[in-house]
Amino acid sequence: MYAAALWLLCRREILMAGAFAGLITALCAVIGVLAADAAPWLAVGLGLWLLGLAWTVLGWRYPEPFGTSVPAGAALALLGPVVAVHNYGWVYALGIGTAIVVMVASVPLKNVVMVAFGSCALLGYIVAVVLRYADRSIGMSGSLVIIGLTLISLAIVTIRLGQRTGPIGGRSTDFRP
């Protein structure tokens, strides 16, 4: 609350980040108290995911004065399902879907950071799914082959999306004379 009050007086990005961190902490605490007996890990994970989506949409809708709201919200939306995947397997689908949406949304937004966040999250979720569900049936070597092929495919998709989003900061990264 203190960071939000300071932000209203002097709009700086670090103060908004502090207010965002305070909001995340407060949300996790309230969800932990309200869902103490039911499914606290699922509630906190989904709460963080929803907060990240909301922050992303607000940052996209109102880009001024901060350009980091969309990547920060996307990062939170990508990390939210991680809290609940150890107890609920279906949350992997939510994480994979969110990662794909973040990567696809990065193209019209021309945001290379979101491509990186989405591809890293997608790789992490797919590796976790393969190691959790396919390890026993196909063995560790088969799992590593699937993960390697996934990594190569993800690298190709990331490069293609990175080419569509353009260079970082509107500058060319080609240093040839």
Image (cartoon, helix red, strand yellow):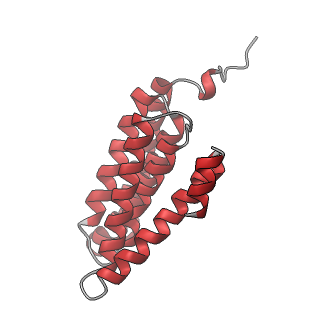
Residue sitting at the far right: 177
Position above or below: 86 against 105 = below
Question: How many labels, in total?
Answer: 0
Q: Is 19 or 177 nearer to us in this picture?
A: 19
Identity of the residue drawn at 31% across and 65% down: 46
Residue sitting at the far bottom: 37
Give residue 103's position: percent from left, percent from top: 40, 40
Position above or below: 3 against 169 = below
Residue 46 in view of the camera: yes
Q: Is residue 50 left or right of residue 168?
A: left
Q: Is residue 174 left or right of residue 26?
A: right
Q: Quadrant of the C terminus?
A: top right
Residue 173 sits in which quadrant? Answer: top right
Residue 138 in view of the camera: no
Identity of the residue drawn at 37% across and 80% down: 32
Q: Quadrant of the N terminus?
A: bottom right
Q: Is 172 or 5 nearer to us in this picture?
A: 5
Give residue 174's position: percent from left, percent from top: 67, 20
Give residue 157's position: percent from left, percent from top: 41, 36
Position above or below: 48 against 160 = below
Identity of the residue drawn at 42% across and 72% down: 28
Give residue 129's position: percent from left, percent from top: 33, 65
Residue 90 sits in which quadrant? Answer: bottom left
